[in-house]
Image (cartoon, rainbow, N blue to C red):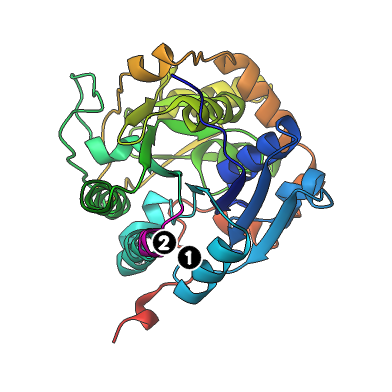
Amino acid sequence: MDEYRPRNILLTGGAGFIGSHVTVKLVEKYPDYRVIVLDKGDYCSAEENLKSVLQNERFKFVHGDIRSKSLLDYLLREEQINTIMHFAASTHVDNSFGTSIGFTVNNVVGTHVLLEAAREYGKLERFIHVSTDEVYGGETQLLQTEESLLAPTNPYACTKAAAEYICRAYLMSFNLPIVMTRGNNVYGPHQYPDKLIPKSICLLQEGKSAFVHGDGTPTRNYVFVDDCVNAFDIILHKGSPGGVYNIGSDQEKSNLQVVKDIIQFMNLKADRVEHVEDRAFNDERYRIDSTKLLDLGWRQKVGWERGLQLTIDWYGNRQNLERWPSWRNGLVPHPQLGVPAQQELI
């Protein structure tokens, strides 16, 4: 099968963590692609993440919200978009327990507005929808394939599952060429420090202890951001419309072990751990099968030790943190960041 070749890409959430890395990769690797980033400038995003491509003539940054139908209509027509890569989302599980309606508005309604704009536009050749392994729920024994039942257990995961079902409706009802991805935990530079790895690094650098929810036994599988970007590169060009692709890792670590590894890599005393109250609900494990992606040629290349050291080095440069004016606000056990979207409701 011939590889898909996009021309004009609308990439939502492109100033955020993974989206910014994907944007830079596409602009720098493919000289015949144009990338238009649409980002609303949430607390966890930063134009600084895109510094290396801001002056590139094949890149454009648009400050705006995916819930603005008129803006989407304009961009799709004006930029002659043939590909959408949809990274924009509210993503932090802790935040979702306190502002769950806001997550529904951003992740479900926002995705629906984007899909409807794409349907009306009628010229889209690919729609890459970025989901999460959390839609499978916390099954501890079974290896989840793309055909496994969706059984989300927290508000964030539920909104991502709901967005997937709307995507499926547009695929089946309107033949929108949608490809979906579900990924394990991604880590590395550009990630706002309210997530476990960057938060722990920053706290330890501040001379404080790193927080661990509950007893720290739940495990997660980790993918370094460069490997994740390579996965999206492959899925964009080789993924089949209607297909779902897991982006999984064999690097499984308990939350407590992650913190212990960071402490060891930073040459600190082992007692720099503070156990705090657990989340309202905390899935025990996410194990996903990436055979379909491996069959397309993807391989996980960055080992845990190498990826963690690169991440520690990046956050060790305080200037890198200044791109987020509120970065210290994430250094609490259960952050509640972002603007709740309840005001959008009647």
Q: Main secondary structure of the magenta part?
A: helix
Amino acid residing under circle 1: Ile
Q: What is the number of callouts on the image?
A: 2
Counting from the top left corner in percent of width and height, residue 66 is at 48, 65
Question: Disc 1 and disc 2: Cα gap in Å?
Answer: 6 Å
Q: Secondary structure at mark 1?
A: loop
Q: Residue at x 41, y 61 (%)?
A: 114
Counting from the top left corner in percent of width and height, residue 285 is at 28, 28
Extreme residue toward the right, this view = 55
Residue 117 belongs to the span the image colors magenta = yes
Asked if labels 2 and 1 touch by Cβ distance under 8 angstroms, the answer is: yes
Q: Nearer the viewer, residue 317 or 78?
A: 78
Nearer the camera: disc 1 or disc 2: 2
Counting from the top left corner in percent of width and height, residue 202 is at 65, 42
Q: Is residue 30 left or right of residue 238?
A: right
Quarter of the image with the C terminus is bottom left
Q: Residue at x 69, y 44 (%)?
A: 206
Which residue carries the number 1 mark? 66
Characterize the local packing of mark 2: few (<14), some (14-19) or many (20 or more) Cα atoms within 10 angstroms. many
Magenta segment, which residues? Answer: 115-123
Which residue carries the number 2 mark? 114
